[in-house]
Amino acid sequence: METYQLETPAHMRCRDQAGHACREAPHPHEILDIAIAGRFGVEYQPLVDVRSEAIVGYEALARFHRADGIPVPPDLMFKALHENPLLLLHVELETKRLQLAHAPKAQHLFVNLDPDSFHIGEGIHANLFVDLFRHHRQQSGQHITIEVTENLSIQDLERARDMISVFKGAEFGVALDDMGVAGTVVSYDTLSESSEVKFDRSWLSRRTPRRIDALQWFLGLCRVMEVRTVLEGIETQADLEFARAAGFDWVQGFLYREHFVHWQPTNSY
Ligand SMILES: [Ca+2]
Ligand SMILES: [Ca+2]
């Protein structure tokens, strides 16, 4: 399949007068069209080692757009898909296949997986997602880490714990995503089965002495438990210096925008 890698073209950007991306909930027929016609792409954001500043891997993020090329925010798309489990499964499988197939060459590939999708993908003998990721690992030799998606409800926590155990058992990495926001899945059990914890950008924006103390305590715990720490939302050199001084292992964010990799099917709009 023909591919190109570039920033979102101007005609595909949907912005209001203040320059923010549009936040209109997509109509059901748009959701169906996006899902069936495969109007989705991938944005790969580099994960960077704080000490060497080398790119050690990428996080694959799903991107969706309508037939006219206007992007649909992924959170709104997934919210709508949650009301249609089979459609959710279809979109998750198709987007993960693309994310694996077009992944930049790097030691690590991080993919996001919703515990609900994982649950729907459960078969009699195997799970569709475990099979998909295992196949890619065998073909590419790439180390795959599953990011446990943020903003889980209480009911989701049980499913998240199941998912973490299955992937850990199949020798995949597991990253707890968005440490710092409410509803996080972090506990002693989940931490002991994880390879990474990803701290959200609120640790950069709200730096009270109490929060810095709490951060140091948590980073120390991660070190003791041999869990790698990642700080997201790095935008400036000062953010990077903060991450370095705090002792994070890896960072991610718009400071590395020029190294983002985009994949989009050429004929999807
Ligand atoms: Ca993520
Ligand atoms: Ca995140």
Image (cartoon, rainbow, N blue to C red):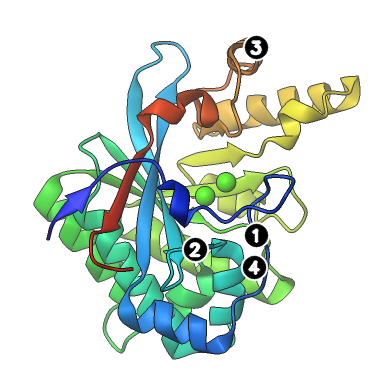
Does mark 4's beta carbon lie closer than 8 Å to ligand 1? no
| Residue tagged 4 | 157
Q: Are marks 2 and 4 in contact (CB under 8 Å)?
A: no
- Place residue 26 in its image quadrant: bottom right
Q: CA distance from mark 1 to mark 4?
A: 30 Å
Which mark's residue is nearer the viewer, 3 or 1?
1
Q: Secondary structure at mark 1?
A: loop
Amino acid type shown at disc 1: Cys
Residue 256 visible in the picture: yes
Does mark 3's beta carbon lie closer than 8 Å to ligand 2? no
Amino acid type shown at disc 4: Leu
Compared across the picture, whether 196 is left or right of 94 comes to: right
- Vertical arrangement, residue 80 with respect to residue 147, above or below: below
Pick the front one: 126 or 208: 208
Compared across the picture, whether 1 is left or right of 237 comes to: left
Q: What percent of the width, then of the height, locates residue 151?
A: 68, 61
Question: Which residue appears at 61% of the width and 18% of the height?
Answer: 236
Q: Secondary structure at mark 4?
A: helix
Q: Residues within 10 Å of mark 1 (few under 14, many from 20)?
A: some
Q: Earlier in the sequence, mark 3 or mark 1?
A: 1
Q: Are marks 1 and 2 in contact (CB under 8 Å)?
A: yes
Amino acid type shown at disc 2: Ile
Amino acid type shown at disc 3: Ala
Which mark's residue is nearer the viewer, 2 or 4?
2
| Residue tagged 1 | 22
Residue 238 is marked as 3
| Quadrant of the rendering where the C terminus is positioned | bottom left
